[in-house]
Amino acid sequence: MAYVITDDCVCCGTCIDECPVGAISEGADKYSINADDCADCGTCADSCPNDAIKEG
Ligand code: SF4
């Protein structure tokens, strides 16, 4: 299962540099994770200061 970014995302950009496989992209309202690329490592969830990333 891929991780998902919830509506708690405030687009701070912290996670995008942490993902080892480049699965996170910037969106209009929030960042998103490409489920096909996500390696399910959890690094982004640990890095999010707003606790906006959850296991899908
Ligand atoms: Fe990237 Fe790991 Fe987060 Fe998946 S769980 S988006 S591979 S940092």
Image (cartoon, rainbow, N blue to C red):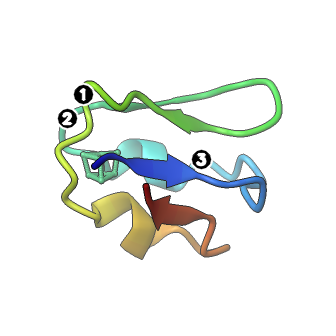
Give the alpha-carbon distance from disc 1 to disc 2, as whole Å.
7 Å
Front-most of residues 22 and 32: 32
Q: Is mark 2 within 8 Å of ligand 1?
A: yes
Crowding around mark 1 (Cα neighbors within 10 Å: few <14, some 14 to 19, many 20+) is few
Is label 3 in contact with label 2 (beta carbons under 8 Å)? no
Q: Which dot, 3 or 2, sits closer to the camera?
A: 2
Disc number lying in front (3 or 1): 1
In percent of width and height, residue 25 lies at 51, 27
Q: Name which residue lies at 69% across and 25% down.
A: 27
Q: Nearer the viewer, mark 1 or mark 2?
A: 1
**The residue under label 3 is which amino acid type?**
Gly
Q: Amino acid at mark 1?
A: Asp
Q: Classify mark 1 as within 8 Å of ligand 1 or not, answering yes or no.
A: yes
Residue on which disc 1 sits: 37
Q: Callout 2: helix, strand or loop?
A: loop
Q: Position of residue 5 (x, y in %)?
A: 58, 50
Please tell me whether mark 3 sits on a helix, a strand or a loop.
loop
Looking at the rendering, which quadrant does residue 33 occupy?
Answer: top left
Q: CA distance from mark 3 to mark 1?
A: 18 Å
Q: Report the Cα–Cα distance between label 3 and label 2.
A: 16 Å
Q: Earlier in the sequence, mark 3 or mark 1?
A: 3
Residue occupied by mark 2: 21
Q: Which residue is mark 3?
A: 13
Give the total number of marks visible in the rendering.
3
